[in-house]
Image (cartoon, rainbow, N blue to C red):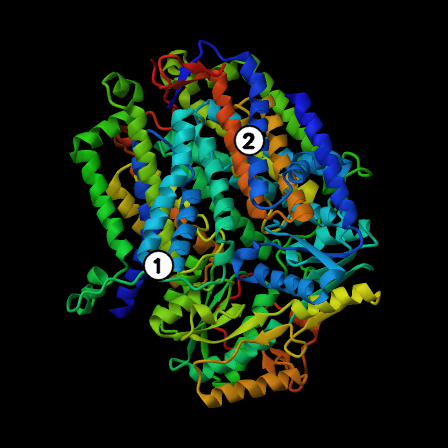
Amino acid sequence: MRIELVKRPERSKLFSALSPFIAFALTVMAGAILFAALGKNPLAALYTYFIDPVTQVWQLHELAIKAAPLILIGVGLAVCYRANVWNIGAEGQFVIGAVTGSILPVMFPAATGWWVLPLMLVMGALGGAAYASIPAFLKTRFNTNEILTSLMLVYVAQLFLDWLVRGWWRDPQAYNFPQSVQFNPSAVLPELDPMAGRANWGFVFALVAAVLVWLMLSRMMKGFEIRVLGSSPRAGRFAGFRYSYMVFFAFLISGALAGLAGISEVSGAIGQLQPSISPGYGFTAIIVAFLGRLNPLGIVAAGLVLALTYLGGEAAQTALGISDKVARVFQGMLLFFVLASDTLIHYRIRFAGIGQKSTEAA
Amino acid sequence: MDITVNILLTIATAATPLLIAAIGELVVERSGVLNLGVEGMMIMGAVCGFGAAYLTGSPWIGVLAAIIAGALFSLLFAFMTLTLATNQVATGLSLTILGLGLSGMIGTNFVGLPGVRLPNLYIPGLSDIPVVGKLLFGQDPLFYVSIALVIAVSWFLFKTRKGLMLRSIGDSHSSAHALGIPVIAYRYLAVMFGGACAGLAGAHLSLVYTPQWVENMTAGRGWIALALVVFASWRPMRVLAGAYIFGAVWIGQLHAQAFGIPVPSQFLSALPYLATIVVLVLISRNKRLTMMNTPASLGQPFVPDR
Amino acid sequence: MKKLIGALMLTVGAAALSTAASAQEKFKACWVYVGPVGDFGYSYQHDQGRLQVEKELGDKVETAYLENVAEGPDAERAFERLAREGCKMIFGTSFGFMDPELKVAAKFPDVKFEHATGFKMAPNMGIYNARFYEGRYIIGQIAAKQSKAGLAGYIVSFPIPEVVMGINAFMLGAQSVNPDFKVKIVWVNTWFDPAKEADAAKALFDQGADIIVQHTDSTGPLQVAQERGLHGFGQASDMTKFAPKSQYTAIVDDWGPYYVSRVKAALDGTWKPEDRWEGLKEGAVVMAPYANLPEDVVKAAQETEAKIKGGWNPFTGPITKQDGSEFLPAGAVADDKTLLGMNFYVKGVDDKLPQ
């Protein structure tokens, strides 16, 4: 028996809507088998994984915290990937955004006032964009592959941050431990509802960015350009668009959003600079971008789902003693099922080789 | 003299796993498939290689197990991206997540156990020649495998008919399909070759470099291997050069520190990455040459029309 | 389909709730680790301590842990989750957890918190650490006695006081034997990358060191020493199995006794937040069996060990700083606060401390 794909004439509306549910059902089944094989109660495990995190208000806040950077970065990456610009260095742009955004609260800790926070956010976004402009410049000027340069710059950014918080920017009061001073209150991103949980304005930024980019992509001229160039550079060039502008545009947008995510994270969730400020958000966001089918609104959903799997994984560790490794395996399985189910949107699946009659799963 | 030989040997050890993983990925990408799951396949190779060697006592069975583990694990990626036409970037990244988790699960009971080291080559007489003896005839077996792989891949891609077909698939899968080349079958084999190489590279870490198993022991080397392929603009000999340049800068910065050069260590640690960028900029300035070597259909899903 | 899943979830929910209820009676102690428990280094040793609590206190306690918790926003969630899930006592085992743990401690006054290697306390949060430097003084003496080259290679992770303190203690120990002893230092900027640590060890050996010391967590450097027929010291756990011919001894973190005593105190109701910094005397730091050493060196090491257990501090003056200024006059002993914030080298260290 062989599996064959038959391209649908146009994308299936039915499966666009249904595919997440198919993926979920498959994950539930596979997960039940996995947990049962490990001697855990599969029902309890699945409950802990998917339901428990969304039944409590504080966990919903945590979900928003975890999803915010993923969405912000993912939305920016969607612009890149639609333009066929392969920025995989968002992690570095995130870090540099956090650093440039922190210049004000770290070097001028006495600065207070309403203007501090907006200025920090702008500087963070500018820093991320500036850092992203390096691969863009090398790409357009020297034709250097941006996958490699943007990835290499991630390591450089992390080491730069490390150097800063262990030396120049170290808090003199912190027993020489590697961290900057705590930001003063006017440099801290406020929480949305401090009584209920920790979620801060970063999540709102993420939603706003998603909507704005969605509008841009679907309505505006730039959106058209990006789509044209992404699907066929030559067609784009015929239409009169400059390819190098597009590369810069995509990198600057995604760099700025990653930088904004960086400073929001540091100013909102952490409150100071330290050597490690991201558990790989910039890389996870790449998955988020594709899970969301490069659609900013889809990315919001994908970001929330991925954040849920992190939270669920932690809940499963503490409540049922399911190890972090199993949680990651389960997360990987979920991603595979989601990706595979999306195939149904564009293709019909045919099981060839069972006699003459082909069974169609559609 | 001794110190030079030792430094060269250290560089060779550092470069070998990168080279093996990168040469495998090069074949994958030449066929037009981008598998970002190298880190995941590598760590699977590391744990399976270690486990098999530990349980049987034979490092060679470990090497074999690592190759098989890498190839089987990559089959998952192949099925997803080639049969189900899923997005290659996202699938590859998911493969890495899965690999890091799965290897941890498999390896739980191997933590804290001393491994079995793959013995270095020793040819009486030859290996004892001063200076060159150790370099040419006294290294670990996988070093020779890595060099042989580069030569074999280079020969296969540019001197054989099948290699030509593979490259034509990478350049344009639709025209290759129109010519009657079995695109999907070639790509399956290429991906599995890449997986086998990544698994072997993992075995180098857990059986030669530091014979032990610990979680996340690949520590990002899969990503470096991926970068090397691009760095080499998809040319096998340049992968060889790239892996050794990277290894040399990597080891060089440690020596620079030990000599007491007063530069922040973070800067020295960043040096290999910066050097990679600089060298790449220098070689990619020749636009025609890079364009010529880049597989044009890299990362694009292909579904044959029927 | 959706209905079915919904119905399924309801039953599952009921099942999960009932298991939660039955587990209420035991005292729940929980841990947060920064790395995987399978690192065979820092987090592994903490987890061994947790297992000892389970073993010794048996039915009276249950334990849980979260591993691989990144320092940053994830940390606060980890502590909050454990506190909400009924943990009565939570140990945060990494410096970077300090501020998040403190925040959560303020929210859950009934839960007892303990934080390793930090300096901030609260009415329900104590701090603890181990005096690893005591062991480093001893290995400094051994290195100076055993090194033919009079030169040790020292692999270090990050320039934090803990590590700087270790380098200084090592040098003071070495200088007590050979005043001209030298050390070469390589910062690898990671706690854990076996291959990179092995590379650093090779570089140091190539530059003439014949003994390797590490303040990173993997067995990589010792394996290199074994291959080259040279020697070194294990870190965090006893690494004899990886280098039976090369390990002189190891500075072992043994958190077990401490954890057992603290959980016991909580069970008895005698727990209060304390600043506990324990060393060889209390058994928080243990020297692995001395091996591959001549008898007189072992004897000298044991004597030093006994002296430290008797209350002597390796940081006892006269000690001069690297720049020649006086750190401690003769007979003066460094106080804990100075040690915990140490950011200078003592005389004789030939390296510039990253600032």
Chain ID of residue with mark 1: B
**Residue under label 2:** A288
**Residue under label 1:** B208
Report how far apart the C-alphas of labels 2 and 1 lie in the structure: 37 Å
Residue A189's x, y, as percent? 72, 38
Q: Residue at x 76, y 38 (%)?
A: A58
Residue placed most toward the observer, B108 or B281: B108
Residue A205's x, y, as percent? 67, 29
Three-letter code, disc 1: Val
Three-letter code, disc 2: Val
A331 above or below C242? above
Q: Quadrant of residue A21?
A: top right
A146 above or below B121? above
Left or right: where B131 falls relative to A205: left
Q: Residues within 10 Å of mark 2 (few under 14, many from 20)?
A: many
Q: Residues within 10 Å of mark 1 (few under 14, many from 20)?
A: many
Secondary element at tag 1: helix
Q: Quadrant of residue A349?
A: top left
Residue C199 visible from this viewpoint: yes
Question: Mark 2, mark 1: which one is toward the viewer?
Answer: 1
Residue placed most toward the observer, B265 or B139: B139
Residue A50's x, y, as percent? 66, 34
Q: Quadrant of residue C132?
A: bottom right
Secondary element at tag 2: helix
Q: Which mark is residue A201?
A: none
Residue C120 visible from this viewpoint: no
Left or right: where A360 falls relative to B148: right
